[in-house]
Image (cartoon, rainbow, N blue to C red):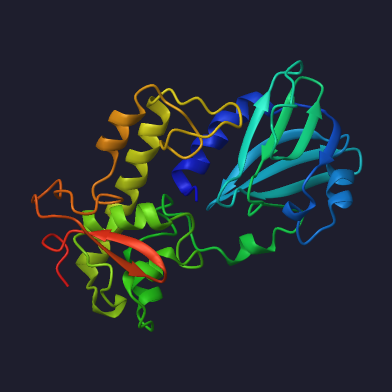
Amino acid sequence: MPELPEVEILRRHLEPRIVGYQVQRVKVYKKRIVRPDAAGELEKVIQGCQILGIHRRGKYLILLLNSESGSNKILIHLGMTGRLFSLKKTDAIDSFPHLALHVECDKGQLCYVDPRTFGRWSLDLSCIDRLGPEPMDSSSFHARYLGHKFSTRKAKIKDMLMNQACVAGLGNIYVCEVLHAAGLHPLLPVGQINSNALKKLCQCIRRTLKSALKIGEQSELNLQGAGAGDGFFYFGRSNRASQLIQERFRVYDREAKPCRVCKCLVERIMISQRSTYFCPNCQKA
C-alpha cells in the first residue's frame, strides 16, 4: 500500500497536470470504490466542476473542486492496487481493463484504475479528523507529543507508529526503516522509550521520509498509465529501478541479507499480521 512519500510524489506529479481542468463528464465504472456515498451522487458533485487543487493528508489525496453552487472536496484513498493518472484529451481509455472511474475534462482526462477495488472515493472527509499529526510538521509532531501519546499505552512501538491516529502517513515499509535508523526493536513497549530516544525517533522519521521524497523526485519516475510498476516507488517505473531498489531500503524486504550498518543478517517476524524486518544487532530487544 502506498505510504506518505509515494502519495506525496503522486500529488506533486498530478498537480501541474490537472489543476485548472474543467470537468465535462464523469463515469464510475466500479461502484464499490465509492463509499459510503452512492456513485451517482459523486458523479453529480464532480460534474461541471473546476479542479482547483490536489492536497495530501496522511495517505489520502483530497481533490479541491469549485462550481457555481460552491466548493467541494473529494477524498481519495488508493488502497492496495489503485492508480491515479492523467491522460491527454485524445488518449484512448479502452486498454484499461480495470478502469474504475474516469473524469473527462476540457484539457485532458483523469483516470483511476483499481483491480482489487480496495481504494475509495468519497464525499465524506470525517476520517481526516481522526488522523494524527503529519510527521514532517515539527510544530505538531515532536518528542513531547510522542511522550504524551505513549505515556498511558502498553502497545509495541511498531503498532503505535502504524496507527494513523498516532501519526499520519506511515506504513509497514517506512516504520521498519525508521525503527532500524532509530535503533529500536519493533516489539519494544512504548512506555520503555525515554525522552532522548523519542527525540532520535522523531529525527529518524523525518530524515527517512525526506530521503524517500528526494529519491522519488530525482528518479525520473514514469507515473503515467495503468500498467504494472516495476517494484519501485509503487506507482511508477524507472529505467534504474533494479539499482535503486537495492540502494533504497535499510532492512525492509531484506530478510537474510546483511544489515547495511553491522552486516548482521536481517530477520523477519510477524507483528499484527504484517512482515516486520529488523536487525537483531542494531535493534536489540
The spot of residue 45 in percent (x, y) is 86, 45
Viewer-proximal residue among 158 and 241: 241
Relative to 23, residue 139 above or below? below
Q: Which residue is drawn at 72% across and 34% down?
A: 52
Rendered view: 270 above or below 103: below
Nearer-the-camera pick, 108 or 138: 108
State the residue in front, 75 or 95. Answer: 95
Q: In this view, does 159 lie above or below 254?
A: below
With 106 as the anchor, is 186 left or right in this view? left
* Left or right: 60 in relation to 284: right
Name the spot of residue 193 as percent of width and height, x first. Answer: 24, 73
Residue 12 percent coordinates (x, y): 54, 32
Identity of the residue drawn at 25% across and 49% down: 254
Q: Quadrant of residue 199?
A: bottom left
User: Where in the figure is residue 65, as x and y percent of width and height?
Assistant: 77, 40
Q: Who's the residue at 15% across and 46% down the image?
A: 260
